[in-house]
Image (tube, helix red, strand yellow):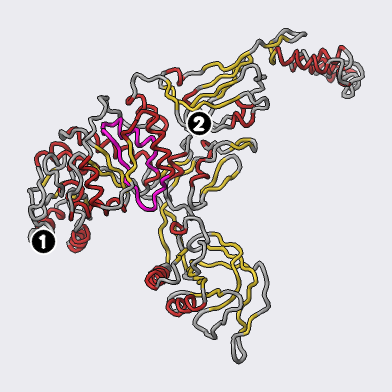
Amino acid sequence: MKKSLLICDCLGTQTIDAAALKAATGLECSRLHTALCQSQIALAAKAMEGGEVLIACQQEAGRFADLAEDIAAPMPEFVDVRDRAGWTADTAGTTPKMAALLADAALPQPPLKTIDVASDGICLIIGAPEVAFAAAEKLADILAVTVMAPTGADIPVTGRYNCCTGRLHSVSGTLGAFRISIDAFQQVLPGGRGAAQLTEPRDGAQSECDLILDLTGDTPLFPAPEKRDGYLRADPGSLPAVADAILAASQLVGTFEKPLYIRLETSLCAHSRAAQPACSNCLNVCPTGAILPAGEHVSIDPLICAGCGACSAVCPSGAISYDAPPVDHIFRRIGTLASTYRKAGGQSGALLVHDVHGGEMIRLAARYGNGLPAHVIPLEIDALAMFGHAEMLAALASGFARVDILLAPNSDRDVLQGQAELAAAMGAGDAVALLDIADPDALSDHLFDRAPAAGAAITPILPQGSRRQIARLAAKALSPDAQIIPLPANAPYGAVIVDTDACTLCLACVSLCPSGALMDNPDMPQLRFQEDACLQCGLCANVCPEDAITLKPQIDLTDAALSQVVLNEEEPFACVECGSLFGVKSTVERIMEKLAGNHAMFANPTASRMIQMCDNCRVQAHFHSQNNPFAGKERPRVRTTEDYLSKRKDH
């Protein structure tokens, strides 16, 4: 059954063209309501009983969800066209934008992959005694609390929670699985009169807990502490902050679903080969330390990963990709927004990418200010940092005139800035901008004061394939006449430059190249290269014994990048026995010059001649040589059937 759209002008505060929306999106639109969540809610109930509906109101989603549950109707879906499109000072031409938002909301949502995390409520509280013990009193009836006070602190005599003294040596883990090492550890001895008696101090005490309440006010125990599940930290001098942390701790008991944000394909990872370092982009940008080296590839701890998405944006090979939702779903949303906006008559559209923080700014700007211009189409995603250069280029090549990234206070600015600079070099120019604006009115003023960009006259692409394929396709669409575009350092595209005078064609680079960009020729001494596959990981330069390889960041938009080119080749050497070609002539001659007559193993001409033989002839020469240490007695004649038959006749 086709999904129907319930529309409402929210007490006449926005203009909705039902016929135009149906034509652009294909959704069956209801008649225009004016108070669907109030006096006309019976009409909403009737529509929900009739089948699947999409309600164009996000503010009252809870009310409609409760209604669907009460009447046992299918749960409706929701989309906000009011705050993001209808409530704007730019009242003319909002229909294309509404149509784009509706088409985006109608896309099937991929299922979210999760993992269960269990917490039994075993809580460690650290901090100054007066603050830590007060927090323990509040949490003792809910959690299994242990307070670790500094060495020498007065320990209360209580049975409501556990007490100890010491100092943290190391902490690792996450919600439900923290591992703790404590030095100078002393625990309370039960019994006795007066003040609590403690055991003798000892170092290296080990323990585990489910959550940690840090009220020390000191340096956080973890990098990016706000992203570590189960680690609650508050300024002990702020009573509201401590109260909020205590309340949050009281809720961390039970089984929780943690999203699996990242998908890792280890076979594509270019971290290292043969203990030689290569790409470490993800390690350099992970704020939580969830990514660690694991031999030739990296590993990701899904329990520590906070889903910022930065690793997905900087991974050159696609070994790491964002998976909540998958990257291809983001490309599908971009293409849907752009194509529907154009189909409904929109021009010079600007994509405004934001997260939850940006969504709240937009709602405030719409309710109390000028909202967003009609040509600015918002795209809300969970992790801003995953919106890399490929997504930026894809948006422009899909038909948007410009792309703005609205930063949040906790956004990974360095990652986004680097990706924006790479996109600019690959053809985006100044059409991509990072908006570091924290005031809703200032955001509206900035977008309204800026004239709509005309955009390049391009044929919109269909963003499908891997991120590398889409980035290349988009760059070619944005710069159709360009051939080779130089890129910033550390770009994941480029060429390999070989010093042919230094290269000996040892082909160590070929055997270790993680992407197969460097290849040999089995028929002759030759080093080949396919630029489209090169990740610029630097492994070839690291393993080259002659330092003959350098990297050149660039992107070749011609078809030459898709084919193999010869970087170095030499004449093969002909075996002096059979004449078959093997090895490199210059290398064999160089070895002869250094070893023949100059080394004990090659002192006589017969031994030296073996250097000039192919593998088969060298084995034969060794076998038939005199004084061969592996030689045996003359092999006996092979017995045949006739020998056995003749022996029977004799008997």
**Image mark for residue 535:** 2
In primary-sequence order, the first of circles 2 and 1 is 1
**Image mark for residue 67:** none
Q: Which residues are magenta?
A: 386-413
Residue drawn at x 63%, y 81% as measured from the top left: 198
The type of residue carrying mark 1 is: Gln
User: Disc 2 vs disc 1: which is toward the camera?
Assistant: 2
Q: Residues within 10 Å of mark 2 (few under 14, many from 20)?
A: many
* Residue that extends furthest to the bottom in the rendered view of this protein: 193
Closer-to-camera residue (644/124): 124
Up/down of 519 relative to 569, above or below: below
Image quadrant in which you'd find residue 518 = top right
Q: Is residue 76 left or right of residue 431?
A: left
Magenta span contains residue 394:
yes
Q: Is residue 462 left or right of residue 202?
A: left
Q: Residues within 10 Å of mark 1 (few under 14, many from 20)?
A: few
Q: What x and y, as percent, mark residue 224?
A: 47, 55
Q: What x and y, as percent, mark residue 578?
A: 74, 8
Q: Which quarter of the image is occupied by the C terminus?
A: top right
Q: Which residue is mark 1?
A: 38
The type of residue carrying mark 2 is: Leu
Q: What x and y, as percent, mark residue 84?
A: 21, 48
Residue drawn at x 15%, y 55% as measured from the top left: 49
Image quadrant in which you'd find residue 205 = bottom right
Up/down of 484 relative to 383, above or below: above
Up/down of 382 relative to 117, above or below: above
Q: Is residue 210 left or right of residue 475?
A: right
Q: What x and y, as percent, mark residue 310?
A: 44, 44
